[in-house]
């Protein structure tokens, strides 16, 4: 079976096995998840696994102009309308027998949803001004943010289009619910940065503690951005100061620690590291905020490194 979604999280491993089963088929796929959970990455990986060497076309449905919607999707013949001085291929035609990724599907205008539904049902489309249809040969993968069922209920996405595209409906869990995947991704991302000629860097033990504890509301995208910046600021070893995580996020960090059943001593040490990060790594300043001696804070840091 094709390995499409490597992860240590049981739920994500199940999703990976499901993706592997449908990869060789033409079954439409609907990927749902919070922003930054890797929907586009999964779609591209699915394409490489099942249709290597064929076109991968990504369409941002929210960027399609309503007035040019049909021309953008289906293309047009020369002379089909006033400004059509020459023929133009649409996104469906350019996808060929590859993969057509419809990003932000629920932002597609109503008329576009009707037209797309017809294409999916008939497996053909008409370029604007053309009398003969063209076959729809691409595999369709639709991407939507979390909460798509509610948007269907509100009428923002046609239920018949939703059901047509949800041949396999997978929900990617947020990064905060899969902490075992955080460090492998961070390590892989830092190696990738170094491989592209960037500054080789690794996460110090204290930074590892905060990276695992932070809830990452922006998911993988936020984590990658933080690591990009930290690698530039660090001198080989990324500490808590280089992470520059938002100070206002401590209540979320504490709540996440409680959900994961962290011992009180571990939460106290985590808070000390958090204050140290907000102090820019200045031990004396952080010790004053915490109401402890520099020696105590240094001891806590050694305990973090040892653990």
Image (cartoon, rainbow, N blue to C red):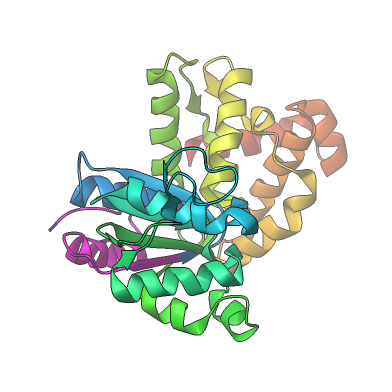
Image: 82 above or below 233: below
Would you say residue 164 is visible in this rendering? yes
Would you say residue 146 is visible in this rendering? no
Magenta segment: 2-31
Image: 16 above or below 284: below
Q: Nearer the viewer, residue 151 or 194?
A: 151
Q: Nearer the viewer, residue 103 or 203?
A: 103
Residue at image x 30%, y 61%?
132
Residue at image x 48%, y 21%?
201
For the N terminus, the image quarter is bottom left
Using residue 20 as the reference point, say whether residue 151 is left or right of it: right
In magenta stretch: residue 114: no
Using residue 124 as the reference point, say whether residue 109 is left or right of it: right
Query: In the image, residue 76 lies at what x, y percent?
Result: 44, 50
Residue at image x 20%, y 48%?
51
Q: Nearer the viewer, residue 229 or 244?
A: 229
Query: In the image, residue 290 lies at what x, y percent?
Result: 82, 43
Query: In the image, residue 91 lies at what x, y percent?
Result: 41, 50
């Amino acid at each position: 079976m094709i390995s499409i979604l490597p992860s240590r999280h049981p739920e994500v491993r199940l999703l990976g096995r499901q993706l592997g089963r449908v990869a060789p088929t033409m079954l439409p796929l609907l990927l749902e998840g919070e922003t930054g959970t890797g929907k586009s990455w999964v779609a591209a990986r699915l394409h490489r696994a099942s249709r290597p060497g064929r076109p991968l076309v990504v369409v941002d449905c929210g960027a399609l102009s309503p007035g040019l919607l049909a021309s953008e999707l289906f293309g047009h013949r020369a002379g089909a309308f006033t400004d059509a001085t020459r023929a133009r291929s649409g996104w469906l035609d350019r996808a060929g027998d590859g993969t057509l990724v419809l990003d932000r599907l629920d932002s597609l205008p109503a008329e576009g949803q009707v037209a797309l539904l017809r294409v999916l049902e008939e497996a053909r489309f008409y370029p604007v001004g053309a009398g003969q249809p063209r076959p729809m040969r691409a595999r369709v993968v639709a991407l939507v943010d979390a909460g798509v069922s509610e948007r269907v209920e509100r009428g923002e996405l046609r239920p018949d289009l939703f059901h047509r595209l949800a041949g396999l409906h997978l929900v990617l869990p947020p990064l905060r619910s899969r902490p075992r995947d955080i460090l492998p991704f961070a390590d892989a991302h830092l190696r990738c940065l170094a491989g592209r000629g960037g500054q080789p860097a690794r996460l110090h033990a204290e930074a590892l503690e905060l990276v695992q504890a932070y809830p990452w509301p922006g998911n993988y995208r936020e984590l990658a951005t933080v690591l990009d910046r930290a690698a530039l600021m660090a001198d080989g070893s990324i500490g808590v100061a280089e992470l520059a995580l938002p100070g206002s996020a401590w209540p979320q960090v504490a709540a996440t620690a409680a959900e994961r059943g962290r011992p009180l001593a571990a939460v106290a040490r985590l808070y000390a590291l958090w204050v140290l990060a907000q102090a820019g790594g200045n031990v004396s300043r952080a010790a004053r905020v915490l109401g402890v001696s520099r020696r105590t804070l240094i001891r806590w840091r050694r305990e973090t490194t040892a653990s």
